[in-house]
Amino acid sequence: MAKKKKEQKRITRKLLNKYRLVILNEDTFEERISFKLTRLNVFVLSMITTIILISCTTFLIAFTPLREYIPGYSSTSLDQKATRLVTTADSLESVLSINQKYYNSIKKVLTGDVKTVEFDIDSAVQSEKLNLEEVNLDPSEQDIQLRDEVSREDKYSLFESEKSSTDFSLFPPVKGSVTEVYNVEEKHYAIDVAVPKDTPVKAAAAGTVIFAEWTAETGHVMILDHGNNLLTVYKHNASLTKQQGEQVKEGEVIATAGSTGELSTGPHLHFELWRNGYPTDPSKFIDFE
């Protein structure tokens, strides 16, 4: 016990022993500054200095822009920019996806690539259960009258579903003799109208030119977008008077008829009508003769 007390006294004495720190002039050895210190003073002063340095550094990092210069520390402005870039990238990806679908639709229009209707096995099974001999397929008198009335009213109107939202009709792009009709079996999704060379070709409806280029097979081609997923296509033209991106009015001249392209056999207009990515018989809505 006495030995332990002696050790404590020795340590206390070392801590409290006074030392003198003197700063001398090197040439004259003149005493300029002197300090009286103990080991305890030096320890306490070192701890206080360390705490102050840590506090100041923490303040600079947490509350000043200097933290942006510290490697590995995230910048608020950089985080905001990164967030904006991620949002922009997502938006661009969505727009790109929509545009890709739109371009694929135009490609189908140019190449005449139409998907076949998928076979519904459930419908086939149900139809097999029906005995056609027991089904009366003859229309009633009221049914015949209704069909005649609807046929007369809708002869030249475009899609009954659109009547509620817009009053839409199609203008004949040219007047002439129909040389080839719409034929799905032969993959001729258009009406061919024979006209003299350089006959003005007019827009079937108001819309935007989304394609106005030359193709090897169909010559000068123009495609108009009329909204509501409706496209009209004009092929084998001698020349085009409108460019991609231009707005056109109904009946406005957009091209001159000709016989351009490898598939053309004479001056005529090859006119197509596409709805929701699928072709439609134009003669149901336009009188070409």
Image: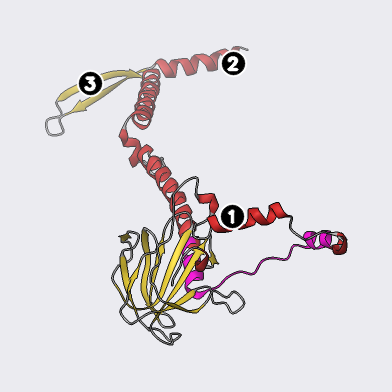
Q: Would you say residue 227 is visible in this rendering?
A: yes
The correct choice, above or below, for 13 with respect to 258 in the image is above
* Residue at the farthest left position: 28
Element type where label 2 sits in the image: helix
Q: Quadrant of residue 200?
A: bottom left
The residue to which callout 1 is attached is: 150
Q: Would you say residue 104 is visible in this rendering?
A: no
**What span is colored magenta in the figure?**
102-127
Left/right of residue 54 with respect to residue 137 in the rendered view = left
Element type where label 1 sits in the image: helix
Mark 1 vs 2, N-terminal side? 2
Left/right of residue 33 with respect to residue 133 in the rendered view = left
Indicate the amino acid at tag 3.
Answer: Ser
The residue to which callout 2 is attached is: 3
Indicate the amino acid at tag 1.
Answer: Val
Residue 34: mark: 3
Q: Quadrant of residue 137?
A: bottom right
> How many C-alpha atoms fall within 10 Å of the one at disc 1: few (<14), some, or many (≥20)?
few
Q: Nearer the viewer, residue 161 or 65?
A: 161
Residue 115 in picture, x, y percent from top left: 61, 69
Single out the mark in the foreground, 1 or 3.
Answer: 1
Q: Is residue 116 magenta?
A: yes
Question: Mark 2 to mark 3: distance in Å?
Answer: 37 Å
The correct choice, above or below, for 61 with respect to 137 in the image is above
Left/right of residue 231 with respect to residue 29 in the rendered view = right
> How many C-alpha atoms fall within 10 Å of the one at disc 3: few (<14), some, or many (≥20)?
few
